[in-house]
Image (spheres, rainbow, N blue to C red):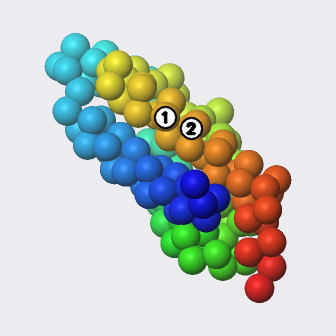
């Protein structure tokens, strides 16, 4: 199969996982919702935390568009988005999520890794040197 087609399908899968994670998070069981409400406030309950999440979200949207169209800036932007997401995980409070959301996050993380591998360590890296 064509590596470029695999790459583009991985990006679409990653976007799909992102959307499904948001949807599945909205439909958590009442037990999980109650546990989450009883947790202490965290960094992302502040205005700066919310601004950081929105910034990373916008970076993600721009980066996947740029990657899909093989724009040079997409490589760096996607890497910084992943690093920003990891930093958010360290700054955030404990997360209580359902099994479906957990599986979706795991698959999304796998696609992130596959995309990073392809853009930095495969022949596709040459397509970003325009």
Q: Which residue is mark 2?
A: 109
Residue 124 placement, left or right of 9: right
Q: Identify the residue at horizontal 47%, vertical 50% (top origin).
A: 14
Gap in angstroms between the C-alphas marked 2 and 1: 5 Å
Q: Nearer the viewer, residue 115 or 78?
A: 115
Residue at the outermost front position: 1
Residue 72 vs 116, above or below: the answer is below
**Is 120 displayed left or right of 51 in the figure?**
right
Within the image, what quadrant is residue 71 found in? bottom right
Q: Is residue 95 visible?
A: yes
Q: Is residue 5 left or right of residue 99?
A: right
Tag 1 residue: 107
Which residue does the image show at 71% across and 54% down from the upper left? 118
Query: Which element is circle 1 on?
Result: helix
In the rendering, at what x and y percent does residue 52 appear? 55, 56
Quarter of the image for residue 21 reads: top left
Image: 11 above or below 62: above
Q: Could you tell me which residue is drawn at 17 percent across and 19 percent down?
A: 30
* Mark 2 crowdedness (10 Å alpha carbons): few <14, some 14-19, many ≥20: some
State which quarter of the image contains the N terminus: bottom right
Which sits in the foreground, 83 or 9? 9
In depth, the one of 56 and 129 nearer the eye is: 129
Residue at x 40%, y 45% (from the top left corner): 17
Query: Tags 2 and 1 in contact by the CB under 8 Å rule?
Result: yes
Label 1: few (<14), some or many (≥20) within 10 Å? Answer: some
Observer able to see residue 7: no
Q: Percent from the top left, x then y, of residue 108?
A: 50, 40
- Asked if 112 appears above or below 30 in the picture, the reply is below
Q: Give how far across and how far down residue 79 sits, in percent.
A: 71, 56
Residue 60 image offset from top left, x and y in percent: 54, 61
């Amino acid at each position: 199969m064509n590596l470029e087609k695999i790459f583009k399908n991985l990006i679409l899968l990653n976007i799909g996982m992102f959307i499904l994670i948001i949807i599945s998070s909205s439909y958590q069981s009442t037990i999980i919702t109650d546990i989450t409400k009883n947790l202490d406030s965290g960094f992302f309950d502040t205005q700066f935390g919310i601004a950081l999440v929105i910034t990373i979200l916008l970076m993600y949207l721009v980066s996947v568009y740029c990657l899909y169209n093989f724009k040079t800036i997409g490589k760096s932007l996607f890497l910084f988005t992943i690093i920003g997401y990891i930093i958010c995980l360290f700054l955030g409070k404990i997360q209580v999520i359902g099994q479906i959301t957990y599986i979706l996050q795991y698959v999304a993380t796998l696609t992130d890794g596959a995309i990073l591998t392809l853009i930095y360590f495969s022949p596709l890296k040459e397509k970003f040197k325009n």
